[in-house]
């Protein structure tokens, strides 16, 4: 008995994309991020292949109502550097949530995805909204 491995084609992966709508109210940041990363990569699909971008679209609302566990609200910082001398900036978690709560979830999901050429394409399929949205972008028609 011979077994054949079937690999998904890029055009079939494009046609079978679905939209997932998630509500971030009272969800833990890390657990929600892993769920989103799995949906963006397409690991939940039967015909998943790591070299094919077969993930789905994900829309997340109410990111301002995310929660984190433990003492992270006071201990967690976001770090960035401009590249110049003395260009380091750290922003506490609480202030980042007040300024832009979508950035917190976006950075968390971004760091869970593989650092390769498909990461930017996958992140384009992620839509984040801080409040409760009533209108979502309509899915594009398959070519």
Image (tube, grey):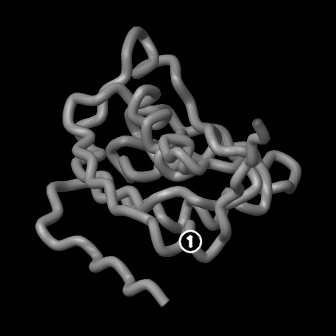
In the rendered image, which quarter contains the N terminus?
A: top right
Q: Is residue 81 visible?
A: no
Q: Is residue 54 above or below residue 70?
A: below
Q: Nearer the viewer, residue 66 or 116?
A: 116
The image quarter containing residue 51 is: bottom right
In this rendering, is residue 48 above or below 79? below
Question: Is 20 left or right of 51, judged from the image as shown?
Answer: left
Q: Work out whether residue 58 or residue 68 is closer to the camera in this orientation and state it.
A: 58
Q: Quadrant of residue 94?
A: top left
Question: For mark 1, what is the residue?
Answer: 12
Q: 128 or 71: nearer the eye?
A: 128
Place residue 131 in its image quadrant.
Answer: bottom left
Name the residue at 37% across, 22% down: 68
Q: Residue at x 56, y 42 (%)?
A: 43
Residue 130 spot, x, y in % from top left: 27, 54
Q: Relative to 129, does residue 140 appear above or below in the rendering?
A: below
Counting from the top left corner in percent of width and height, residue 77 is at: 56, 30
Note whether residue 15 is visible.
Answer: yes
Residue extending furthest front?
1
Residue sitting at 16 percent across and 73 percent down? 135
In-image side of 129 versus 44 (left or right): left
Q: What percent of the width, then of the height, locates residue 83? A: 85, 55
């Amino acid at each position: 008995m011979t077994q054949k491995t079937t690999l998904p084609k890029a055009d079939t992966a494009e046609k079978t994309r679905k939209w997932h709508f998630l509500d971030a109210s009272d969800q833990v940041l890390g657990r929600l991020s892993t769920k989103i990363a799995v949906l963006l990569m397409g690991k939940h699909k039967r015909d998943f292949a790591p070299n094919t971008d077969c993930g789905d679209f994900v829309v997340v609302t109410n990111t301002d109502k995310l929660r984190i566990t433990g003492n992270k609200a006071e201990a967690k910082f976001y770090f960035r550097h401009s590249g110049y001398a003395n260009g380091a900036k750290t922003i506490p978690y609480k202030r980042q949530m007040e300024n832009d709560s979508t950035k917190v979830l976006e950075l968390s999901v971004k760091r869970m995805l593989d650092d390769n050429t498909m990461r930017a394409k996958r992140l384009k399929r992620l839509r984040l909204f801080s409040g409760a949205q009533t209108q979502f972008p309509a899915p594009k028609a398959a070519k």
